[in-house]
Image (spheres, rainbow, N blue to C red):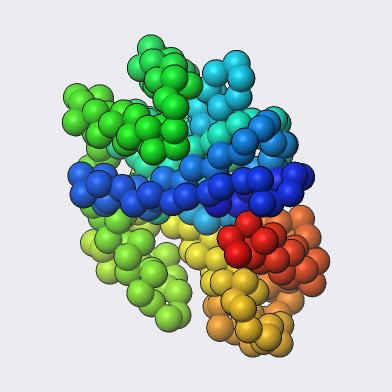
Amino acid sequence: MLARAVTTMLFSVLTTRAFAPPRALARFVECVRVIDAPELARLRYERLPDGKTELVVRIDGRGADAGAMGTRTRAVSKDAGPLASAVVVRFRAAGAYPFFGMPMSELTDRHTSIETLWGGSGRALEDALAGARSGEARVRVMLSALEARLASDRVFEPAAAATVRRATRTIAAMETLPRVDALAAHVGLSERQLRRAFDAVIGVGPKHYLRIVRFQRAIAMLRADVPRPPWGVIARDAGYFDQAHMIAELREMTGRAPSELARRLAERRRELALRNP
């Protein structure tokens, strides 16, 4: 799957594959996905807020075009145009910061070209990806570039990066989401220090990150292949104050009413089932 991508062509003409990163990158990269079509296909790039950054490459007859899609605070849906292949590197939460040489807050809610971020190295990566003749070859090119970046002297390493990674693991393991002051105390920082650390490493502050986690917990319940629980149950289990609170936040973050969002997620399940019988 191309990071929430949907196509206007028949799903059977597309092939999608996911590749696990090598050990050297596994702490930072969740997976690399490749999508190929036997002829140019029009795709839409759709992504909900998830606290993560992606490096997206589209390849067509003219070459490759790569860019970073930073952490999203609102859903995005855009026409990716006609392409023959695409590669998406999905970074883990708090995993993208070493590769882009700047605080991640500078990439939040933005698409930034790899040439802007890496200069000549970015252009060389695009040329190498355009010249690769298979999905596997493109993945090798991409992973090699990321490994080289990680080993270079240009790695961006905020002092509190390890603390932020610890904080995200703590949040993921908690059934009830913590308050920001409690999270700061747990990891040994002041609230101000924690906010600055999250901005640099993830791209949003801890309060907004917790909001995204709560949103994703609600989305997970809507995506589950089981009858949808009552809205009040989803709100309670995801950590919202009440159902009205959840409805307001879902609308703000996606631009859709909860019922409309649930229908769209169900459509996505059917689309993926057609693409992956």
**Is residue 119 toward the left or the right of residue 81 in the image?**
left
Pick the residue in front: 48 or 188: 48
**Residue 218 in sight in this render:** no
- The residue positioned 54% from the left and 23% from the top of the image is 65
Foreground residue, 77 or 124? 124
**Residue 28: percent from left, percent from top:** 31, 48
Residue drawn at x 20%, y 44% is 24
Q: Position of residue 26 (x, y in %)?
A: 27, 50
Q: Quadrant of residue 271?
A: bottom right
Image quarter (top left, top right, bottom left or bottom right) of the C terminus? bottom right
Q: Is residue 260 above or below residue 28?
A: below
Q: Is residue 105 left or right of residue 165?
A: right
Report the label total: 0
Residue 81: % across, % down: 70, 31
Whether residue 116 is visible, yes or no, is yes
> Viewer-proximal residue, 216 or 186?
216
Q: Residue at x 44, y 57 (%)?
A: 206
Q: Residue at x 44, y 27 (%)?
A: 133
- In percent of width and height, residue 37 lies at 61, 38
Relative to residue 20, is residue 250 drawn left or right? right
| Camera-side residue of 234 and 206 | 234
Note whether 162 is above or below 78 in the view shown: below
The image quadrant of residue 166 is bottom left
The quadrant in which residue 173 appears is bottom left
